Image (cartoon, rainbow, N blue to C red):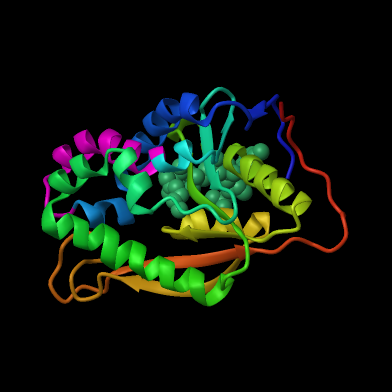
Amino acid sequence: MTNEYPVTATCGGDSLGRLDHAVALISQCFEQDPAAAYWLNDKPHNERIAYHPQLFYHLLKPAALLGAYFLEANTWESTVVMIPPKIRTDSVWISLRAGWLKNIWHLGYGGCKRLIFDYAGTIERAKKRHMGDKPYFYIFQVATLGEHRGQGLSSMLLYKCTEIAQAARTPIWLEATTEGSKRVYERVGFKVMEHMSVGRGKCDANGEAERGGDGLTIWGMKWVPSSVEIYSMPYEAT
Ligand SMILES: CC(C)(COP(=O)(O)OP(=O)(O)OC[C@H]1O[C@@H](n2cnc3c(N)ncnc32)[C@H](O)[C@@H]1OP(=O)(O)O)[C@@H](O)C(=O)NCCC(=O)NCCS
């Protein structure tokens, strides 16, 4: 895949300094995301959207405090957040430091159960099954602003992640929450390891509350480094 217009990508520097940019971008891009809808499906749509900046700030701040990679393209038209191997962003200590108590209050019992136990719990178990105790990078968030989609920006940032992981000879794990994002990840070289179902009997495929609903489908995906360097990436990183 080649880009026909100049694209710049950055991934270095101060993760905390990049946090606000990433939160603004991701909050907007996840307005229609089924997983985000499921976590907040007891609130009216406008309340969910108004809460996104706070929610994503607290989800991403532990990653920033622990030095995750915050990649961006064309000055925050697109972003990918990747957590280095052996870093846990969900320890009690780091969650408290990131201000999670405020979120627990806001999410309430039902929201905490859906986000922490149903969703994150399902994913944690899948990661354990497919990645075991070996080191791996974790791509936590991928997003491109609506008007800049379909130009290869997130693919380019994902290729950058694979280059970092290739240099470390270490695999990457991520989850796709939509068919469209799954296709993008497959094109970059990720393989589906497992179809997970979250909220079956409680929500529909879009994450909206529905008694007896089919639940969300989440695809757990893995990228594996090659043993030989065989490719060069279509981006200009600084
Ligand atoms: C999923 C998402 C991150 C993809 O970002 P993107 O920057 O549009 O991704 P790309 O441009 O790399 O790829 C998207 C499509 O454009 C195509 N494309 C890539 N480079 C292109 C180029 N230079 N010219 C034209 N099309 C191109 C890709 O082949 C892909 O096609 P497909 O939809 O048929 O699979 C974006 O749609 C998004 O932010 N969605 C909302 C949030 C979300 O779902 N995040 C992921 C949660 S798991």
Q: Let me know if residue 51 is in the magenta part.
A: yes
The reply to whether residue 216 is in sight is yes
Does 140 appear above or below 221? above
Relative depth, front residue between 194 and 183: 194
Quarter of the image where ligand 1 sits = top right
Residue at 46% over, 42% down = 63
Looking at the image, residue 45 sits to the left or right of residue 7; the answer is left
Count of labels shown? 0
Does 6 appear above or below 195? above
Q: Position of residue 205 (x, y in %)?
A: 29, 65
What quarter of the picture does the N terminus occupy?
top right
Single out the residue that lies furthest toward the front.
93
Looking at the image, residue 69 sits to the left or right of residue 27; the answer is right
Residue at 41% over, 32% down = 25
What quarter of the picture does the C terminus occupy?
top right
Residue at 16% over, 77% down = 212
Does 8 appear above or below 62? above
Looking at the image, residue 44 sits to the left or right of residue 149; the answer is left
Q: Which residues are magenta?
A: 41-61
Q: Position of residue 180 (x, y in %)?
A: 48, 55
Relative depth, front residue between 153 and 120: 120
Looking at the image, residue 209 sits to the left or right of residue 23; the answer is left
Does 76 appear above or below 35? above
Q: Position of residue 106 (x, y in %)?
A: 14, 44
The reply to whether residue 206 is in sight is no
Q: Let me know if residue 5 is in the magenta part.
A: no
Residue at 27% over, 58% down = 115
Q: Position of residue 203 (x, y in %)?
A: 21, 67
Main SS of the magenta segment? helix
Could you say which quadrant of the image residue 155 lies in? top right
